[in-house]
Image: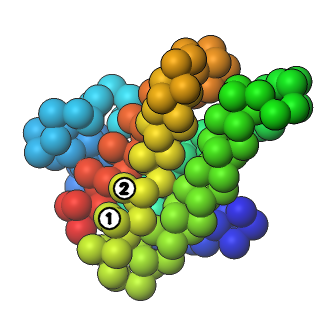
Amino acid sequence: MIVIASALQIASPSLAGAGDMVADTCARCSRSNPNVNYTLCVASLSEYPESRVADIHGLALISAKPLLSGLATITSAARDLRDKAPPVSPARSCLDACMEMFRDAEYDLGSAVAAIEEGRYGDAKTSMSATMDAPVTCEDEFQEQGMAPPPAIKAQSKPLFQQGVISLAIISLL
């Protein structure tokens, strides 16, 4: 996570030029992908001061930051729930699987960031897609066992997935 975080600190300090690059980029993303929530896109990118001077490449890197934070939050929630679940129970098994998926998603996110930095945008899209699938796959794990996903996981899944959609849409503009 430290490598990802330090790579994200370099998120393009170049000037964006005329107009609001964040709003323009989010508008382009929402036009090209109806799953992109324009308001969430603008709000999540604008949380980071460097977004005001970032170009599209920088915004692609910045868009990974909420995912890194979201993965840390959902992993922590899964760990807390797993520690409270009875040993050798279906719930614990699902939570163990989810934690593995979230670890893999962190790796995939790091790969996506590295690929963006290196201009390998096809690889970045592949890795970002894998990252954003983790919360959905975690919920599916519970449903396949005939259980509802725990509220703490469900509450984090949709926002994490939505951030992934935004990041993937920005990468697609590169």
| Along the line of sight, the residue nearer the viewer: 10 or 116 | 116
Residue drawn at (69%, 28%) of the image: 90
Residue drawn at (26%, 35%) of the image: 36
Residue that label 2 marks: 129
x, y percent for residue 39: 33, 26
Regarding mark 2 in the picture, which secondary structure is present there? helix
Q: Quadrant of residue 158?
A: top left
Residue at the outermost front position: 88
Badge 2: how crowded within 10 Å, few (<14), some, or many (20+)?
many
Q: Quadrant of the N terminus?
A: bottom right
Q: Quadrant of the C terminus?
A: bottom left
Horizontally, residue 153 falls left or right of residue 164, namely: right
x, y percent for residue 145: 55, 26
Q: Is residue 141 above or below residue 96?
A: above
Instruction: Give the label on residue 125, or none.
Output: 1
Horizontally, residue 62 falls left or right of residue 98, namely: left
| Along the line of sight, the residue nearer the viewer: 23 or 99 | 99
Badge 1: how crowded within 10 Å, few (<14), some, or many (20+)?
many
Residue drawn at (26%, 42%) of the image: 26
Instruction: Give the label on residue 111, or none.
Output: none
Q: How much space separates mark 1 and mark 2, taking CA atoms?
A: 6 Å
Q: Is residue 156 above or below residue 129?
A: above
Q: Are marks 1 and 2 in contact (CB under 8 Å)?
A: yes
Q: Say which amino acid is labelled 2.
A: Ser
| Along the line of sight, the residue nearer the viewer: 70 or 88 | 88
Q: Quadrant of residue 43?
A: top left
x, y percent for residue 20: 29, 45
Q: Is residue 31 above or below residue 85?
A: below
Regarding mark 1 in the picture, which secondary structure is present there? helix
x, y percent for residue 13: 49, 68
In this orientation, does residue 22 appear? yes
Residue at the outermost left position: 31
